[in-house]
Image (tube, grey):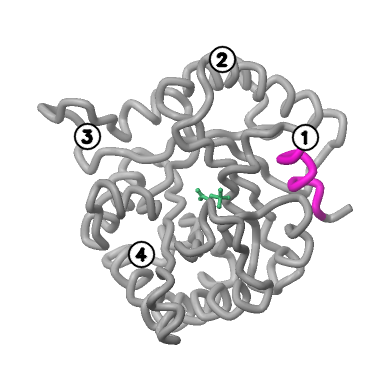
Amino acid sequence: QPARRPLMAGNWKMNLNHLEANLLVQKLAASLNEQQLSDVEVVVLPPFTDIRTVQTLVDGDKLLLGYGAQDLSPHPKGAYTGDISGTMLAKLGCQYVVVGHSERRQYHNEDDALVNIKVKAAFTHELAPIMCIGEGLEIREAGEHVPFVIAQLDAGLAGLTPAQVEKVVVAYEPVWAIGTGKTATPQDAQEVCGAIRQRIAEKFGESTAEVVRVLYGGSVKAANVASIMAQPDVDGALVGGASIDAEEFVQICRFPE
Ligand code: PEP
């Protein structure tokens, strides 16, 4: 079974001003350098306005600390006031872009069809999409979470080739666990992440499913990351709140120790 390199991605959301972003990246880069975390990929996802800062600081050290954006426009350019295109993100050296975060789905009415278009837009600009899927509390309580998440997965990946799917990072983020302090149990995370991988195998082939990275997200902290990462189908974490605290995030990235 080919090894999937663990990925720890820090979603800063709409936090940190320019000076705070500057400080956080410097702290992260310094401690990651010391720790030589060659077996874990670490990525930060700043607001658009901080990407240039992060690019300048990270410079040639993307292997140490990668970065990406939290969203992109479905369009490459044009009259879309306030939007940011994949072209712009690629020019800033982004490697990743989050697509379909539950906060985008909730506050900007993004649906699965738009998520699919954005995933394809990411590929146009050679950005790896971190595609977020996950159920709300009512669906979880009704026991419908697996079929719900699989339907989101199918819609988000519709029309992609297996070679593209290999580069997608799927983030399973149960909405009831995001920013609430309620973490899914490691078994809950494994149940859905395993079902995601199985579905990818059915639709795109075993070999594709073996290399796709599936992350868990939802109140991940240093104190709970190890048990989540111990699950066979969890390949990393999408971390919100805990990612803007340098020490906490570095501890999360050190989960194997
Ligand atoms: C997220 O925003 O993707 C997230 C998982 O947030 P938190 O870690 O704060 O729950």
Q: Which residue is mark 1?
A: 247
Sequence-wise first label, 4 or 2: 2
Which segment did they paint magenta?
Answer: 248-255
Q: Which residue is mark 2?
A: 56
Sequence-wise first label, 1 or 4: 4
Q: CA distance from mark 3 to mark 1?
A: 37 Å
- The image shows residue 241, relative to residue 208, as above or below, that is above
**Residue 103, image x, y percentages:** 37, 49
Q: Which residue is mark 4?
A: 161
Instruction: Report which quarter residue 20 is drawn in.
Output: top right
- Callout 3 secondary element: loop
State if disc 4 and disc 3 touch (CB < 8 Å).
no
State if disc 1 and disc 2 touch (CB < 8 Å).
no
Q: CA distance from mark 2 to mark 3?
A: 24 Å
**Residue 170, image x, y percentages:** 48, 61
- The image shows residue 150, relative to residue 211, as above or below, that is below
Q: CA distance from mark 3 to mark 4?
A: 21 Å
Residue at the location (43% across, 62% down)? 165
- Callout 2 secondary element: helix
